[in-house]
Amino acid sequence: MKYVALLSGGKDSCFNLLHCQRNHHQLVAAATLSPRPGKDEIDSYMYQTIGQDAIAFVAQALDVSLYRRVIQGNPVEQTAEYGLKSAGGGGISGDETEDLHALLCNVLEHHPDIQAVSVGAILSNYQRVRVEHVCRRLSLTPLAYLWQRNQTSLLSEMISTGLNAILIKIAGAGLTTLDLARPLSSMRPKLVSLHQRFGTHPCGEGGEYETFTIDSPLFKSCIDIKVTEVVVVDQSDVAPVAYLRIKHALLAKKEATPVATLNIPVPPLLECPFETLRIHVHKSLYGAISDSASGINYLHPHVLPELGPSLRRIGPWIAVGNVRFPKSHPHPSSVGDEVAHCFGILQNLLVKNSPACSARLELLPTSATITLLLPDLDGPTFFSANTAYASFFGTSPPARACVGVGGVGVGLDCLAWVGEPNETLDNKMVRRMMKGETGTRKALHVQSLSYWAPANIGPYSQAISIPPYTFISGQIGLIPSSLTLPSPPVTPSAPSSSPSTTSSTLPLETALVLQHTARIIRAAPNSRLGDGSEGGFGRSDSSPESSMDDVSRDGIGEGGWIQLAMYYLVYVADVDHVRKNMELVDGLTPTLYAVLSSLPRGARVEKQVLVHSGRFVISDPESSSEEDGEEEEPAVDKSPEFVQGNVLHFYIVKVPHPRVFWSTLSRNKNKGDITVRRPEDPDAEIQVHYEISGFPPSSEACAVVFVRDS
């Protein structure tokens, strides 16, 4: 794609250009936002403004046009998310983010063929979210190949590839004015040492320092800084603040670096534990006669009875299922119209069944997760459905799973948080027990191409956190840097009419699906994994040594506990190959496997999970005074337990309230079977198999139940 580079002059924005080059994108122009004349720096949450006095030299060194705009707005919206959550999701008037929108509109007027924007975000959700918001409104693709990278590794890569940047601002513990103008290559030992001693960010993501790039393999010329001035802002003995004013600089000739010789290191596609998982699935497939068996889809479409929507209110949650277009009405002319009609039904159900005090019209845009069922997921159907779907959401849409279920029409399931119910005796009793932490809704909505995990391919967020839960969207095995599915390995010896198991994409797709899920859990807003300075790549970005043990389910270490896992597959024969390897990663987790007609992009496997933080607060049952109520309740971290037991009431066919269901089970192992007799047919039996994950004595639990007629 042709792209414009957002330039600050710093190392990150310039190093990302090398990765854009490596991924075959074409640089067309550069753009930057500057403070008003006479100011070196402004209080911007979004832009690096130090070094703007020499930014034109960077564009000249790259041999591209530079488009500039003076920053006129202020950081009006300072939260982690940006823009309106309602349909359309416009920007915030007067915010400095809108200056970027105006700047890129100007660039597009001169270069209408530009399709993407390069941004050097590493850890800053604040910056990435705002750039992505602007790009979405302009139909541009953000390119953020440094996103979530381990900073120590990234710093070394910048130096080893020949990027030469100097420090032009210092504001972190351990740095002094003597460090100004020093190159990264000489500063690296000190920066790593400060990180180890004080927890500072090696790449300066905490604002410890800023840089200016004077040479890069992509530069046609290097920048020779002749005259500078040190400006001291704060003379603190611990963390002085000072910057370098570049007063005179020149472009100097350099020997051109052939593009073909550029050696830009990238993270491995799979972390070592997931590479091991890929090998396990491959060995499982290798034992089969051929992969052609996996090509048989045993689905038999059948007419479903029109049951109508189901609705359940449990505490602060509303669950709505089986929302479908009524068969008694004339059928819509397109899938998009059918999706829109189903959303109209869903929105009415949420409004009618929510508390009067809640913002009823905001329930759909701020819901937690939605499952979209489509008759097929071919390109035109998927596009039409996504277009209609997107018209109901703005910033930070719900998590989502989208699957093809054959010729049964469009369907919607939704889970929405509507607030705590009115005070009742039962609720008072619950509050005196252990219950999960609470918090506000936060989203992880990544729309950039990177090496981390796939950008969203529809109007959904990768994760929605409403403590103590995090809802992860369905993940398919896309390669993150290109958003393409893996190609089958070349196996010349295999007959073209009967592909060999060694040519199957299932092992790599499965490994990528599991890795994407793990990375999103680690990066989700509720993960509590420190400051994120180590990046979201697990150990693959910093250490070559790891094994399957490194991906075992340590809830606190991995950002939360998977309490429920759903695997969607297209081929029945794939189920066994996937299932027998999943406990290596998921551990003992309630799990469902569903074979459907199609998945997005033609994928073979999709995974969706529900995560619990494992953090609980415990109220003192003896405390009832107002003063006690104002005290902070103690918090504890727990790991889930898995149970099985016998149902005491043998005439129960429907799964009862989770809390009641829990109380009727005797704890033993994690999996079990129940035989339930039908009252209307005493000779017939239903075999019920269940798996339950919970945190006793809390009532918060997840269960899956399989029902089979004997």
Image (cartoon, rainbow, N blue to C red):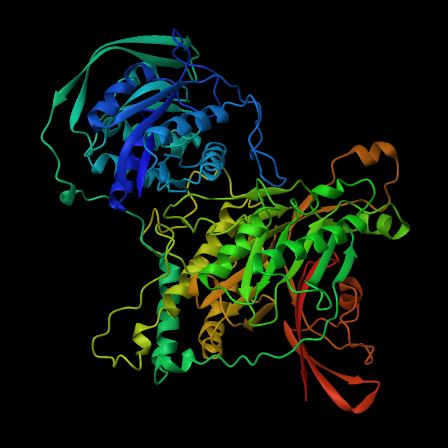
Residue extending furthest bottom? 683
Quarter of the figure with residue 196: top left
Quarter of the figure with residue 308: bottom right
Q: Nearer the viewer, residue 206 or 517?
A: 517
Q: Nearer the viewer, residue 218 or 693?
A: 218
Task: Say how many tags the image has.
Answer: 0
Left or right, 155 with respect to 431, comes to left
Q: Nearer the viewer, residue 325 or 621?
A: 325
Q: Nearer the viewer, residue 680 or 692?
A: 680
Which residue is at a point 82% across and 36% down the rendered structure image?
Answer: 629
In the rendering, at what x and y percent does residue 624 appear? 88, 40
Quadrant housing the C terminus: bottom right
Residue extending furthest right? 425
Residue 100 visible in the shown view: yes
**170 over 643 or under it: above or below:** above
In the rendering, at what x and y percent does residue 35 appear? 41, 14
Which residue is at a point 25% across and 46% down the rendered structure image?
Answer: 24
Which residue is at a point 84% across and 50% down the rendered structure image?
Answer: 427
In the rendering, at what x and y percent does residue 95 appear? 54, 23
Left or right, 193 with respect to 157, comes to right
In the rendering, at what x and y percent does residue 503 appear? 30, 73
Quarter of the figure with residue 563: bottom right
Quadrant housing the N terminus: top left
**97 over 703 or under it: above or below:** above
Left or right, 339 with respect to 211, comes to right
Residue extending furthest left? 255
Residue 155 visible in the shown view: no
